[in-house]
């Protein structure tokens, strides 16, 4: 599982940044925050995905704050997950958390 989580971390960085690259390329190598938010909320299908992602990322943020208060993670880990959430996105933060906290347990069937 750790290999899968590591792969998801890689994809969680590569796929969003590839699409940011393509967005800038299509817009003549200029960044426009106004255009970005205009296009990201273009229709209800995009708004559904935005709402879903916002709720999931907010839930994760609340969860890592809770884990920090319980001392289940230390301040260094907290800031690692926080930075990955805000500098890259939920696509990196969740797989990174799962990678760091995965414990292989034997399963008896």
Image (tube, rainbow, N blue to C red):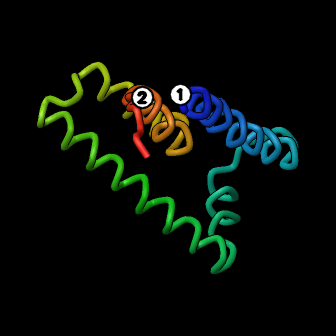
Q: Nearer the viewer, residue 41 or 99?
A: 99
Left or right of 59 on screen, residue 2: right
Q: Nearer the viewer, residue 45 or 7?
A: 7
Eyeballing the image, is 58 above or below 78?
A: below
Residue at (65% x, 63% y) in the render:
40
Picture coordinates of residue 14, whole percent (x, y): 71, 34
Residue lying furthest front: 109
Q: Quadrant of residue 37?
A: bottom right
Q: Residues within 10 Å of mark 1 (few under 14, many from 20)?
A: some
Picture coordinates of residue 3, whole percent (x, y): 60, 27
Residue linked to disc 2: 104
**CB under 8 Å between callouts 1 and 2?**
yes
Picture coordinates of residue 33, whole percent (x, y): 63, 51
Q: CA distance from mark 1 to mark 2?
A: 9 Å
Eyeballing the image, is 65 above or below 62?
A: above
Q: Quadrant of residue 85?
A: top left
Say whether disc 1 or disc 2 marks the residue closer to the N-terminus.
1
Residue at (77% x, 38% y) in the render:
18
Residue at (84% x, 48% y) in the render:
27
Residue linked to disc 1: 2
């Amino acid at each position: 599982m750790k290999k899968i989580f590591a792969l998801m971390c890689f994809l969680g960085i590569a796929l969003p940044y590839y699409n940011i690259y393509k967005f800038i390329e299509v817009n003549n190598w200029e960044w426009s925050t106004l255009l970005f938010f205009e296009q990201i909320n273009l229709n209800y299908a995009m708004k559904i995905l935005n709402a879903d992602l916002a709720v999931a990322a907010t839930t994760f943020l609340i969860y890592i704050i809770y884990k920090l208060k319980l001392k289940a993670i230390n301040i260094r880990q907290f800031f690692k997950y926080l930075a990955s959430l805000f500098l890259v996105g939920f696509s990196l933060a969740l797989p990174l958390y799962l990678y760091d906290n995965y414990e292989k347990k034997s399963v008896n069937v």
